[in-house]
Each structure stands twice: as C-alpha cells, then as structure tokens.
Image: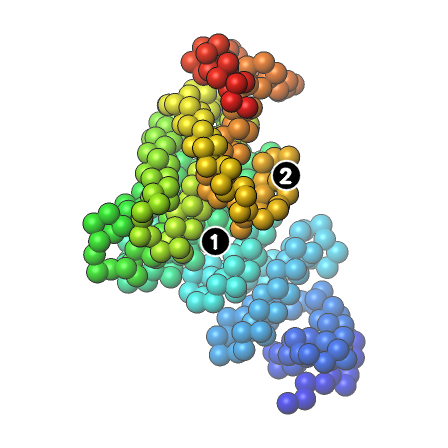
Amino acid sequence: MNFSIEVAGEANPMTTKTLYRTLAAASSTDQQQIQTGTSQLQNWERQPGFCTLLQSLFLDTSLPTEIRYLCIIQLKNAIDKYWRKTASGTIKKDEKDAIRSRCLDCGLKEPDFRLAKQNALMISKIVRYEYPHDWPDALTSIVSQLRSASQISTFPLRLTRALLILLEVTKELSTARIQRTRVSLQFAAPAVLQVLGRLYVDKVQTWVDFLRKGGNDEGGALESIDQSLLAIRVLRRLLIAGWEFPNRHTEVQDIWNILGGHFGEMLSFVNDETSPLHINVRRLIEKHLRQISKLHLSLARDRPAGFALLPSSTDLAFAYWNIMNLFGDTFGTQASNAPTRVIGVDGSADDEYVTILEFLSLKGLLLLRACAKMVFNPAQTFKYQKAEDKEEKSRAKDLIKTTLLDENFVRTMMESL
C-alpha cells in the first residue's frame, strides 16, 4: 500500500483520513516517506483540532498498534509544547477539555502496556499544568477510579492501569518545582494513602498467602504481585513528597510499620536457598524489597528527623547492618563468579548483576551514612523553623546518637569496614 503524500506543507488539509495516512508514512520503513510524514506532522501540530484528532485515532483499537503508538507519542509531545497558556500556538480550551475528558477512561481500558504507559505519561503532563486550579479533581478522579476498580475483581486490568496512571502522576507532582503544586499534593496525600495503602496490604496478603499455603488461583496471585509492586512504587514517592513531617501522622506511622514487617517477610522468601520459588516470582519480590529500601534511604536523606522519629527506625538500621554482615559472609564466593560492573557514588549499579543482598547492603551503608550525617553534619537551611521543628530535630539527633551510633556499634562498624 502506498502512503506517499504528494501535497506538502500546510496546503494539505488536515482530516482524519489524511492524518492517518501521514502517520502511516511517518511510521514506515521508507526514509522518504518518513521524512515527508514527519514534516507534515510538524506543519499540522499547531493547527486547532490536531491533538483531538490524534486522540481519536489513538482510541480506535482497530488501527495497527504502530499507528496508535505514534499517535500517543505525537499527542504527548504536542501537550508538552503547547498546553501551557503562555505557549505560542497554545491548545484552545475546548480542545483541552475534550482531551482531558477522554484520557482517563481510555487509559483504564487500554490492553497494550506500551500504549497505556504513554497515555499515563500524557495524563501526568496534563496534571502538571492543570492541577489544582484548572483540573482540581484530577487526583480525586484517579483515586475514585482506583477505589472502584479494586472493588470489582472481574476487571483486574482497570486496577493495574489505574495504578499505572497514579504512579506517573505522583512522579510528576512529586518532582514539581512550583511550591503550589507540592502543597496541593500534600493536601491530597492522606486521601490517596487511605485507598492505596489498603490496596497494597490486600494485594500483598493475597500473594503471600498463596506462596505459604498454596491454592488454585495462581493467576490471581501473579496479578496481585504485579499490582502490589505498582502500589509500593507509588507509596515510595507519596510518603516522601506527601508529608514534610511524616512522623507526626498516624496514617504514615501505620504504613511504615506495615512496610517494616513486609521487608523482613519478603527477605525471608528470597534469601531461602531451598525455596522453590520460580525465578520470575523471586525477581518480583526482590523488586518490592528494592522499592522499600529506596523509601528507607530517601526518608533518611530528605526527612532525617522524620525518619529517626518514626517507629523502630533504629531497629531498621541495625537490620541493614545484619544484612551487610550476611552479604559479607558470602561476598568472596559471589565476587569470584560475578561479572565486572560499575557502581555509582550513590550506591547504584546495574540491577542485572547485583544480587538482592548486595543491593540492600549498599542501601544500608548509605542509610547509616545519612544517620551519621544527621548527627555530626546536619544540613543547614534558611527555611523558617517553628519551635516544634527545632525540638524534633534535636530529639532525633539525640535518639540516633544514643541508640544507634553509640561507642560499641561505631567500633564494630570501624572494625568490620
């Protein structure tokens, strides 16, 4: 089939048919077709209705996946360039409303992960620009979809897609530079945690029970472990960005205690050499552990006083020390068989070549360093601090110094390291 475009530039009118032909040309293997199609898309991208037509084609599941994928990529890029009110050639309000009204529903029903991922990224960009003023119920709508999807077990895809959308939106809002956006996320965080925390606990309980007791619903257990992994990825970011003083909130303390229990339980699954776990299941559990350890380290670095004053934080630091000792006992045999890789200054390394014990040991060392820095080299800030903030900071420093970094433990670390 020939998708050549003979009329170049703005003279070629934009319709659903011509847009489809142009997308087909831009996704072909012929260099001339690609160049012509790409040029035409660039000419159209500022025209009114371009984004709406792209979304309409994306929603048409009868089209080839390659065409739909290019549609959502073009739409995401156009939103990034022209959604701002101050952008040259900004998208009109009625077109924005039309795109926004369809993006959530189509993302929840999309069976192809690649397409759902790009749609979720597109939604996160819209939320970044519109939340909270122009789209005040953005997070409420997503959480509502998450709640309803978790109550209907016959449509597990909707729940997985709702978690994916929430993950990308949380990523976007948690890294926002505008203070207003971060404050809005903190305002919405308790409602999100209420639904997400319950969902996470339920899904973990489902697959843990299956691994311990067995059963007939292996497919349901695999779905649950995928969904709990998405949930913990959201929780990791939400707990950091959603509360400036996490130790003061009961709901954060509760989920912190739950994650601490899960950390030990999941480690027992993957650290048991006699365990009959399938390699794919083991890797999924290890991914849970990686996410939880990243949460521990991020809290210790970004919310040092809050980390110290959360329940059992010093016990957690000692647990990491025990993991390091366990890894040290087997390091010689593992190192002789391991391929060469580069470990970054932040403790990162290629997950493909890093065992879970090594990964947790690296995070544990960084966590202990963050605790030492909290006591002996605390970060200075020009931000106004209330008396309560100063008191908590002092109490956290004394707690770490007396219960963790006492003389005996410091001597033990120096002798071991």
Return the residue nearer the eye: 74 or 235. 235
SS type, badge 1:
helix
Callout 2 touching callout 1 (CB < 8 Å): no
Classify mark 1: residues with Cα within 10 Å, few (<14), some (14-19) or many (20+).
many
Report x, y in % for residue 191. Answer: 39, 39
x 54%, y 74%: residue: 65
The first of marks 2 and 1 along the sequence is: 1
x 62%, y 64%: residue: 73
Q: Is residue 4 visible?
A: yes
Report x, y in % for residue 89. Answer: 73, 59
x 33%, y 52%: residue: 277
Q: Which residue is mark 2?
A: 344
Q: How many marks?
A: 2
Q: Tell me which amino acid carries mark 1.
A: Ile
Q: Tell me which amino acid carries mark 2.
A: Gly
Q: Which residue is mark 1?
A: 165
SS type, badge 2:
loop
